[in-house]
């Protein structure tokens, strides 16, 4: 239990400092990129820490007009893998800042 206002002020200062660190980290994560592939590297996507798709590369050999579904599946698989990697990157970064505490909206 806190006695007096000093303990609460210290706690509020710590919370503000943590918020600044989290905000800075989120901005830095937006500039980091990950790469994910599917189909043995035939489809490659690059995504940033905000899960923005930055690029999509498709090798000519995987483009078959008679099998568009396979290409669609490969694209989806690469994007989903990229999203998974981004989530892991963000969780790792945020858990370092929050000391492993699960803070809704920060670690998810």
Image (cartoon, helix red, strand yellow):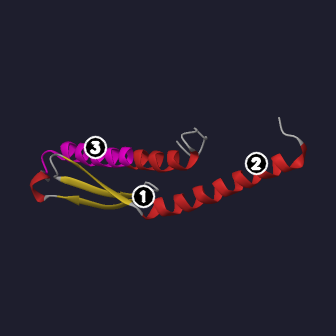
Which residue is nearer to you in this view: 40 or 25?
Answer: 25
Dot 3 falls on a residue whose secondary structure is helix
N-terminal-most mark, 3 or 2:
2
Q: Is residue 66 left or right of residue 106?
A: left
N-terminal-most mark, 2 or 1:
2
The percent coordinates of residue 78 (x first, y second) are 28, 48
What range of the chain is rendered magenta? 65-85
- Report the residue marked by disc 3: 77
Q: Residue at x 70, y 51 (%)?
A: 15
Dot 1 falls on a residue whose secondary structure is loop
Quarter placement of the N terminus: top right
Q: Residue lying at the far right in this picture: please name it.
A: 4
Foreground: disc 3 or disc 2: 2
Q: Residue at x 56, y 43 (%)?
A: 99
Tell me the CA gap for discs 1 and 3: 16 Å
The percent coordinates of residue 65 (x first, y second) are 14, 51
Q: Residue lying at the far top in this picture: please name it.
A: 1
Magenta span contains residue 84: yes
Q: Residues within 10 Å of mark 1 (few under 14, many from 20)?
A: few
- Report the residue marked by disc 2: 11
Q: Is residue 81 left or right of residue 9?
A: left
N-terminal-most mark, 1 or 3:
1
Foreground: disc 2 or disc 1: 2
CB within 8 Å, label 3 to label 2: no
Magenta span contains residue 88: no
Q: Is residue 74 left or right of residue 23?
A: left
Tell me the CA gap for discs 2 and 1: 35 Å
Prevalent SS, magenta region: helix
The percent coordinates of residue 57 (x first, y second) are 23, 60
Q: Which mark is residue 52?
A: 1
Which residue is nearer to you in this view: 101 or 81?
Answer: 101
The percent coordinates of residue 53 (x first, y second) are 37, 58
């Amino acid at each position: 239990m806190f006695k007096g206002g000093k303990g609460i002020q210290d706690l509020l200062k710590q919370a503000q400092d943590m918020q600044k660190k989290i905000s800075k980290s989120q901005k830095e994560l937006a500039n980091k990129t990950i790469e994910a592939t599917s189909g043995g590297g035939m489809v490659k996507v690059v995504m940033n820490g905000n899960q923005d798709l930055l690029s999509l590369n498709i090798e000519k050999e995987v483009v078959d007009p008679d099998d568009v579904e396979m290409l669609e599946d490969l694209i989806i698989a690469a994007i989903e893998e990229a999203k998974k990697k981004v989530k892991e990157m963000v969780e790792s970064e945020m858990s370092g800042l929050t000391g492993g505490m699960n803070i809704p909206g920060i670690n998810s």
